[in-house]
Image (cartoon, rainbow, N blue to C red):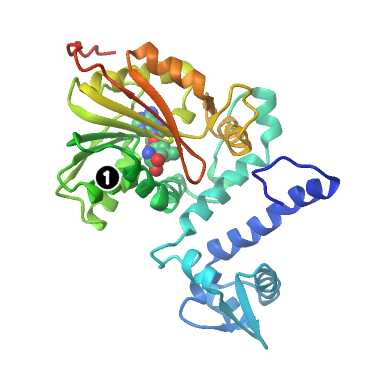
Amino acid sequence: MDCRTSLKTGADITSAMRAHRVADAISAGVELGVFDALASGGMSAAQTARKIKCSARGCEILMNALAAVGLLRKKADEFSLTPLAKKHLASGSPETMARMISHSTNTRRTWIDLQDAVKTGRPIPKTPERMKKSRERQQDDFILAMRDMSRGPAVDLAAALDLSSVENVLDVGGGPGSFLFAMIRRKPSIRGVIFDLPQTISIADRVITQEGFSGSVGTMTGDYNIDDFGDGLFDLVLMSSIIHINSPAQNRKLIKKGFRALRPGGSLVVRDFMLDDTKTAPVDSALFSVNMLVNTEGGASYSKSEIRTWFEGAGFERVRYFELPQHADICVGFRPAGRKTGKTKKK
Ligand SMILES: C[S@@+](CC[C@H](N)C(=O)[O-])C[C@H]1O[C@@H](n2cnc3c(N)ncnc32)[C@H](O)[C@@H]1O
């Protein structure tokens, strides 16, 4: 069953209810290190169990299931990685999705109590007991999940934007900086700033160094709901996967701050899951909104018309949308070229 389309039959409902089993088996394989244990060569379930310090019974049942879904190959008693698992599930692979899987595992632990979030309208507390991980490790999973998920989309966005008059970019809530890095790879003269919370900036600093962008990307620590970004400083302000975290009132203010940070003629680019006016389509965006209910105070997926209202209310002109692969909707608006730079208003 494709979970991006609506359910049509009783069998579809049964499949939907069982889909978590595959996800949970993959999560256990990643979190326990099964895929990493097999990255350097095949071995039996008993040998793997000893290496990852698990029960032989548990390991064999899990590994048989992972072989059944095509992630391991089993020959006699020996298990090895399939090419798909080698590429995406071993943590050392350049195309690893391991942190995305860890982050997805973390969010499933809150989704299981969705009923409580619906009753109260409040997020499910992410206590270390519930999550089975420290807050630092959850944050690391979250930010590196963004890196795992952005490799393709970042290249697509950089290719889709007109960067001819862009030299300075502010990446609001830039996380691991993937979108900024892709723009700089396309146009090396670009300089950028990642603005993010302190716990994320320490991860971003590490990634900037690892990826060789220390000369072109700086970081700024702050809270975008409290701090300003300056006045007329940037040619392009990016907000990728940011507005879904916030309430409509917070987004209205944030988009105004983005406007002020731009030089006249500069553009704000918002990338997110967006909905149509019914708010029931596309399926991915409607389900993502539930993720925001369980995980944030006021976040949701928003409709394109709501977002347009925020852009136009802030003063943007030539507001337009386009879509990129992997369900990414993009909204771009321009600060009018003739308008004078206003004063930055401190909160
Ligand atoms: C979903 S991630 C998106 C990361 C990146 N923009 C991307 O698309 O890959 C959200 C980012 O917003 C940051 N963030 C959340 N609330 C924030 C706030 N109040 N002020 C600054 N950054 C914030 C998080 O730390 C995280 O890096």
Location of residue 146 with respect to 340 vertically, above or below: below
> Residue 190: percent from the left, percent from the top?
18, 42
For the residue pair 347 and 308, the one nearer the viewer reads as 308
> Residue 55: percent from the left, percent from the top?
65, 73
Amino acid at the residue labelled 1 = Met
Residue at screen point 48% across, 45% down: 325
User: Is residue 86 left or right of 2 when viewed as pictured?
Assistant: left
For the residue pair 50 and 189, the one nearer the viewer reads as 189
Location of residue 119 with respect to 195 vertically, above or below: above
For the residue pair 193 and 169, the one nearer the viewer reads as 169
Picture quadrant where residue 345 is located: top left
> Which residue is labeled 1 in the image?
183
Q: Quadrant of ligand 1?
A: top left
> Residue 19: percent from the left, percent from the top?
71, 53
> Residue 29: percent from the left, percent from the top?
58, 65
Q: How many marks?
A: 1
User: Is residue 293 left or right of 204 when viewed as pictured?
Assistant: right
User: Quick one: quadrant of the C terminus?
Assistant: top left
In this view, which residue lies farthest toward the bottom? 76
Residue at screen point 53% across, 68% down: 84
